Image (tube, rainbow, N blue to C red):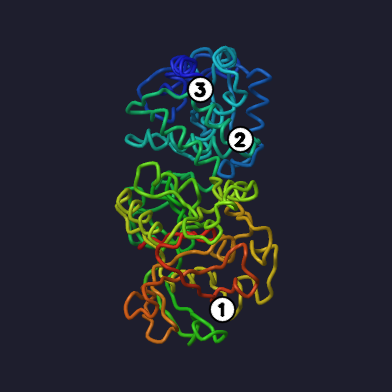
Amino acid sequence: MSTRSLLGAAVFVLVFLCYGANVEAQSGNSGKKFERDFHNDEGGSIQFSTEPDAEARAEFDRILASGGLGRVSADNRIRLRATTEIKYARAAVNDDDIPIVYYNPNLIRDIRRKSDNQWVLITVLAHEIGHHANRQLPSVGHALEYELEADCFAGVTLRRLSATMEQARSAMQAIAPLKGDETHPGLDDRVQAISAGWADSTACVHAPAEILGQTDNSCGGTVVKVAGRDRCLKPLETFKDCIDCPTMVVIPAGSFTMGSSDYKNESPPHEVTFRRPFAISRTIVTGLQYQYCVDVGRCAPGSLQSSRWNSDPAFRSTLGYRRLWAKWTEPGHPIVGVSWNDAQRYSGWLKAKTGQDYRLPSEAEWERAARGGVAGVNYWWGNQYDSEMANGHGGDPVTTPVESYPGHPYGLFDMAGNAFQWVDDCWHDNYAGQPANGAAWKTNCSSNGKYVMRGGSFASEPDGLHSSRRYLGRPDDRVFLLSFRLARTL
């Protein structure tokens, strides 16, 4: 789409995703019903609405059937109503808490006149449905956040309906204003939000803190700041500090036996006790999540600069290599070709962005999380390797999108295989003297400045995917197998 046509599209939808305020609706001739808009209570009313036209209804039903509405109960199904009394579209609930999406039937005509992207109407409706799915009720000060969350939901929906990333981004470019205001973000933020949802179905925060958590110590969990607000987090709950932050899982306090007797560097098996819970990212950091840091100049792109594969210019020019690197760097795959230093820069950027203690997990934190509360076995699912449970065992030389394989009892993914994961500890030849409290071990190192990697990769044999397996590398290694996940202190 040209700049001129993009500007034209932006003008006609400047208020496209802006909603009015308190409204009234009429069903048939049975009288008025008060509606609450999702954004403010400044007045306004709808005197009459009708059944939607066939095309809008069909697209609306496709969205509802796409699987993204687990938080909207079947007996409280979202209604779609047509009215010419609003300009474009609006999400609202009535006095009986029935969720409704209103749209102007002229919307379809205007979309076709201004854009040839078939996904624009779905994007608009999915955005409105997203407000209901996210249960984001009126709250002064959260308008920008809630708009981005609805856009993120739209991205999840478009991917489920087989739109490409580029089609999702183009649809948002056709409807979002170039510059935002106090209630709606600008074009760049909206495109980023819909891209995040498309690339990672866990990228969207599905409800505000006032719905998900309590704010006092009687909640039975740990009260921490999440996205600037107090949340009561219980073991295995998930949370996000920002729309482009990784989804975090709360790992419970307690003890576990770390290590094994299989190899000297995994011995001796010993007890580690965590007196407080901690959080670890649900997945390995994805290419899209990492790209946000690259875009603001705080992180270097992933590369293979120190890989043996990268040392041969003739090999780098082959079609096979280019295809592999393109696959490894897809947004929903783990970021690869990143060093321990790169991972530290990313965690430092996220720490500065959120004000929270994001960091690489300690080796003990990683293994406690990897075992998923299951003791005495090689893998979290048992002692026998199962190719249906992890991406490893010398299969195709390529990563898979995060969450491609089953999650384990703690709700984490790829704790065995897919890509090696850096942890914060420097290398020690065995566990003699390791801290018993789960902290990172960064003193008396035995490896001339090398650091620990865990988890194995898509190229690892079954033995290399055991929960206790340890690997080491230089802090500047940027091999195609290397990635990381994050931890956060609670």
Dot 3 surroundings within 10 Å: few (below 14), some, or many (20 or more)? many
Query: The disc labelled 2 sits on which kind of residue?
Result: Thr
Q: Residue at x 43, y 83 (%)?
A: 431
Q: Report if the CB atoms under discs 3 and 2 are less than 8 Å apart.
A: no
Pick whichever of labels 1 and 3 is earlier in the sequence: 3
Pick whichever of labels 2 and 1 is earlier in the sequence: 2
Camera-nearest label, 1 or 3: 3
Query: The disc labelled 3 sits on which kind of residue?
Result: Ala
Rendered location of residue 355, percent (x, y)? 29, 52
Residue beneath label 1, please? 375
Front residue of 359/437: it is 359
Dot 2 surroundings within 10 Å: few (below 14), some, or many (20 or more)? some
Give the spatial CA distance, label 2 vs label 1.
42 Å
**Does residue 321 lie above or below 105 as drawn?**
below
Q: Report if the CB atoms under discs 1 and 3 are less than 8 Å apart.
A: no
Mark 1, secondary structure of its residue: loop
Mark 3, secondary structure of its residue: helix
Rendered location of residue 370, percent (x, y)? 53, 69
Front residue of 273/176: it is 176
Horizontal side of residue 302 vs 378, given as left or right? left
Residue beneath label 3, please? 174
Can residue 487 be seen in this snapshot?
A: yes
Give the spatial CA distance, label 3 vs label 2.
15 Å
**Does residue 384 lie above or below 70 as drawn?**
below
Rendered location of residue 433, percent (x, y)? 37, 85
Q: How many numbered dots are placed on residues in this image?
A: 3
Query: The disc labelled 1 sits on which kind of residue?
Result: Ala
Camera-nearest label, 2 or 1: 2
Residue beneath label 2, please? 164
Pick whichever of labels 3 and 2 is earlier in the sequence: 2
Horizontal side of residue 353 vs 47, given as left or right? left
Q: Report if the CB atoms under discs 2 and 1 are less than 8 Å apart.
A: no
